[in-house]
Amino acid sequence: LSGSLSIISSLLDSAVDITSGLVIWLTARAIKKRDPYMYPRGRTRLEPIALIIVSVIMGVASIQMIVQSVESILRNSVNPHVDIISLSIMIMTILMKFTLMMLCRRYNNPSINVLGLDHRNDCISNFVAIFCAWIADRYWIYLDPIGAIVVSIYIATTWFLTGKEHLAMLSGKSAKPEFINRIVKICMEHDKRIEYIDTVYVYHYGTRFLVEVHIVMDRNMTLQVAHDISESLQINIESLIEVERAFVHCDYEFEHVPADEHKVV
């Protein structure tokens, strides 16, 4: 309707949103279908993979829009026209995206949080698109492709950072010191019969964490008691919503090198 590249860039973003929403929905559906034989520990790591795919899709679409905007400037083919219909559609879109963003903030789920981030980006990009297209229609036509480039760069940068963050999670990035200290505190306060805490590893296993704890107890303690203490600590750690799995290793001394117990990869 308008021929505005700024509005087209925001339209392209909204169109790709449908694809990203479909990818996230299919991923969530696949995660819920548990297969204890093919995937004994579930398929939760599909979630960051899906978000990385969405990031790539959004990045490619934004780069394509930048190329188209630069070509329109070089060919002098910019011809934006903003009427009341286009303006009304864009305003309604902003209001709908803002409502969806507020709804997404109610849920503590990485995929829904990413969708909320996407809706927030849409609100910003659509507002910039309206402003640039309206100014271009009345004063300076080249502000339209410039606005399209700005919107596309913003979208590409935001999704690049999102993809980078989830790629680090998928690669097993360590948790923040605050959360590691929280795990250590849980171990220290769990049972007085735990004499020492040897090592604590907390790292990403997808969007949530995998925890490895090595504790030291009396070498004369019975196997049953040592097992019960270790298992209850494991259950306590896994009760945290941020934790995917926890492993508790019980030892009777702490003078060995932790790296000797597992191969270094």
Image: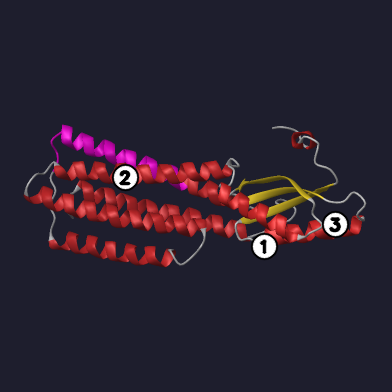
Judging from the image, what secondary structure is the residue with disc 3 in? helix
Quarter of the image where the C terminus is located: top right
Q: Nearer the viewer, residue 82 or 208?
A: 208
1 and 2 marks in contact (CB < 8 Å): no
- Which is nearer the N-term, disc 1 or disc 2? 2
Quarter of the figure with the N terminus: bottom left
Q: Quadrant of residue 242?
A: bottom right
Residue beneath the point at 71% across and 55% down: 187
Is disc 3 surrounded by few (<14), some (14 to 19) or many (20+) residues within 10 Å?
A: some
Q: Earlier in the sequence, mark 1 or mark 3?
A: 3
Q: What is the span of residues highlighted in magenta in the rendered image?
A: 54-78
**Residue occupied by mark 3:** 227
Magenta stretch holds residue 63: yes
Our reading of the magenta stretch's main secondary structure is helix
Label 1, label 2: how far apart the Cα atoms are: 38 Å
87 shown above or below 76: below
Using the image as rendered, state which of residue 2 and residue 54 is in the foreground: 54
**Residue under the point 22% across and 52% down:** 128
Circle 2 residues within 10 Å: few <14, some 14–19, many ≥20: some
Q: Name the residue tied to disc 2.
A: 154
Q: Which mark is residue 239?
A: 1
**Horizontal relation, residue 233 to residue 73: left or right:** right
Q: Which is nearer the N-term, disc 2 or disc 3?
A: 2
Q: Is residue 244 above or below residue 157?
A: below
